[in-house]
Image (cartoon, helix red, strand yellow):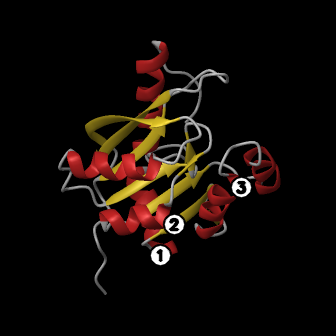
């Protein structure tokens, strides 16, 4: 059976921002070959906007990251409630997309908070289209364009210690460091 290569993965994370900030938020992507950092890219997304899917796709395409074989993100939103359509992103890039979360999301509370954001019905539909989170080892995942077995292989290939894959951990550290002057906390 052919097993596609799931090395050279880009992980995206947004930069920290003040609760009352309403402008654009930095979005950092780190490309790793296994656990080794190869490339860092940066874009910007609107707080609670609709552009995260497009910006992620553009960063991968515009930077000619032809060697990227998969996309990861920590959570299905960035910059507040800027929801990523993982199926659209997967189709646009013709790559698998894996959302990784430390804990099972509390969807009832999440959807209640989402109601306060303009366009909440559309955003909720996008989240529901992503499918129910599935437990995979120490983390929960949502996926587009790859099987659960391939998701496990992608996690195994990119996670060196702890539960969070290196592309996500490094994107988190870099986004925090470039925004606040130092990184803090866990990815």
From the viewer's perspective, tell me whether residue 54 is left or right of residue 23: left
From the viewer's perspective, tell me whether residue 105 is left or right of residue 57: right
Q: Look at the numbered disc 2 and give the secondary structure of its residue.
A: strand
Q: Name the residue at 57% across, 52% down.
A: 76
Which is more toward the observer, 80 or 1? 80
Q: Look at the numbered disc 3 and give the secondary structure of its residue.
A: loop
Residue 104's disc is: 3
Quarter holding the N terminus is: bottom left
For label 2, the residue is 143
Q: Decide: marks 2, 1 in contact (CB < 8 A)?
A: yes
**From mark 3 to mark 2, how far is it between C-alphas?**
14 Å
Q: Position of residue 153 (x, y in %)?
A: 42, 65
Q: Name the residue at 69% across, 50% down.
A: 103
Q: Would you place residue 120 above or below residue 172 in this image? A: below
For label 1, the residue is 147
- Whether residue 142 is visible here, answered yes or no, is yes
- Whether residue 33 is visible here, answered yes or no, is no
Q: Look at the numbered disc 1 and give the secondary structure of its residue.
A: loop
């Amino acid at each position: 059976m052919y097993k596609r290569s799931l090395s050279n993965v880009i992980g995206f994370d947004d930069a920290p921002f003040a609760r009352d900030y309403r402008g654009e938020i930095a979005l950092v992507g780190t490309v790793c070959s296994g656990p080794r950092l190869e490339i860092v890219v940066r874009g910007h997304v609107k707080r609670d906007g609709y552009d995260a899917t497009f910006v992620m796709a553009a960063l991968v395409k515009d930077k000619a990251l032809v060697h990227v074989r998969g996309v990861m993100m920590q959570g299905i939103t960035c910059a507040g409630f800027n929801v990523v359509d993982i199926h659209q992103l997967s189709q646009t890039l013709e790559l698998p997309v894996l959302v990784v979360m430390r804990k099972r999301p509390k969807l009832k509370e999440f959807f209640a908070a989402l109601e306060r954001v303009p366009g909440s019905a559309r955003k909720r539909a996008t989240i529901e289209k992503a499918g129910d989170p599935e437990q995979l080892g120490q983390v929960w995942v949502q996926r587009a364009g790859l099987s659960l077995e391939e998701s496990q292989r992608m996690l195994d290939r990119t996670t060196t210690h702890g539960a969070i894959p290196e592309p996500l951990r490094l994107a988190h550290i870099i986004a925090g460091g470039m925004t606040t002057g130092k990184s803090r906390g866990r990815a």
